Image (cartoon, rainbow, N blue to C red):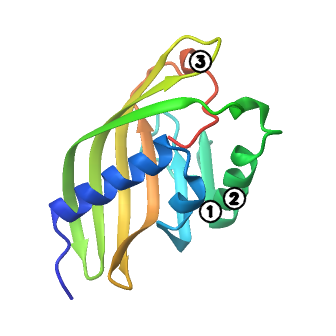
């Protein structure tokens, strides 16, 4: 099995960012494993466990799929019309490699533009566990750690960070 390289990981993260920024969420789902998780922990316990800590968001694959259905529906008033986002990803690092899985850390900023609202910036760190499935990288675990001290000023986070 070929070793997973930082270059391969960067290309994967950039592709994921483009899919999310372009609201190609069904295609984004194709980047996830069948047991994927997506979490946004509280800013006071970024390494917390969703079983014992109240997370901003903690979804398994079933909830992720339902979230995508809601976000793509015109009845989803929180995101219709969709926000415009632009993600910048940097400082991509391979933290650990274990067979066909790799743990990744990266920094990000996501600019969000929404009609009748002020521009907002979400700054933080991504933590991924990526797994090679059928020769392609897939997201097994995706954690978004926000750097904001106070989350109220960020408004509702109704899109995929």
C-alpha distance separating marks 2 and 3: 24 Å
Taking the image as shown, residue 8 lies to the left or right of residue 76, namely left
| Residue 138 image offset from top left, x and y in percent | 41, 70
Q: Nearer the viewer, mark 2 or mark 3?
A: 2
Taking the image as shown, residue 79 lies to the left or right of residue 43, namely right
| Residue 73 image offset from top left, x and y in percent | 77, 45
Residue that mark 3 sits on:
152
Chain-order first, disc 1 or disc 3: 1
SS for callout 1: strand
The answer to whether residue 94 shows anywhere in this view is yes
Q: Nearer the viewer, residue 101 or 53?
A: 101
SS for callout 3: helix
Taking the image as shown, residue 87 lies to the left or right of residue 114, namely left
Q: Quadrant of residue 149?
A: top left
Q: Which mark is residue 63?
A: 2
Q: Quadrant of residue 123?
A: top left
Residue appearing at x 18%, y 83% in the figure: 2
The answer to whether residue 51 shows anywhere in this view is no
| Residue 94 image offset from top left, x and y in percent | 20, 59
Residue appearing at x 21%, y 89% in the figure: 1
Chain-order first, disc 2 or disc 3: 2
Q: Are marks 1 and 2 in contact (CB under 8 Å)?
A: yes
Residue appearing at x 73%, y 54% in the figure: 69
Q: Is residue 85 above or below residue 161?
A: above
| Residue 80 image offset from top left, x and y in percent | 72, 32
Residue that mark 1 sits on:
60
Q: Which mark is residue 103?
A: none
C-alpha distance separating marks 1 and 3: 25 Å
- Mark 1 neighbour density, 10 Å: few (under 14) some (14–19) many (20 or more): some
């Amino acid at each position: 099995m070929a070793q997973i390289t930082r270059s391969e990981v960067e290309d994967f993260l950039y592709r994921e960012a483009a899919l999310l920024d372009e609201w190609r969420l069904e295609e984004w789902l194709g980047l996830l494993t069948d047991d994927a998780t997506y979490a946004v922990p509280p800013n006071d316990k970024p390494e917390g466990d969703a079983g014992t800590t109240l997370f901003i968001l903690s979804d398994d694959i079933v909830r992720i799929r339902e979230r995508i259905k809601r976000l793509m529906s015109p009845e989803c008033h929180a995101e219709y019309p969709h926000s415009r986002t632009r993600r910048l990803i940097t400082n991509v690092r391979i933290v650990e490699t274990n067979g066909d899985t790799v743990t990744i850390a990266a920094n990000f900023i996501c600019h969000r533009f929404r009609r009748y609202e002020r521009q907002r910036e979400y700054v933080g760190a991504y933590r991924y566990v990526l797994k090679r499935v059928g020769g392609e990288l897939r997201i097994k675990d995706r954690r978004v750690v926000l750097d904001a001290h106070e989350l109220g000023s960020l408004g509702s986070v109704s899109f995929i960070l």
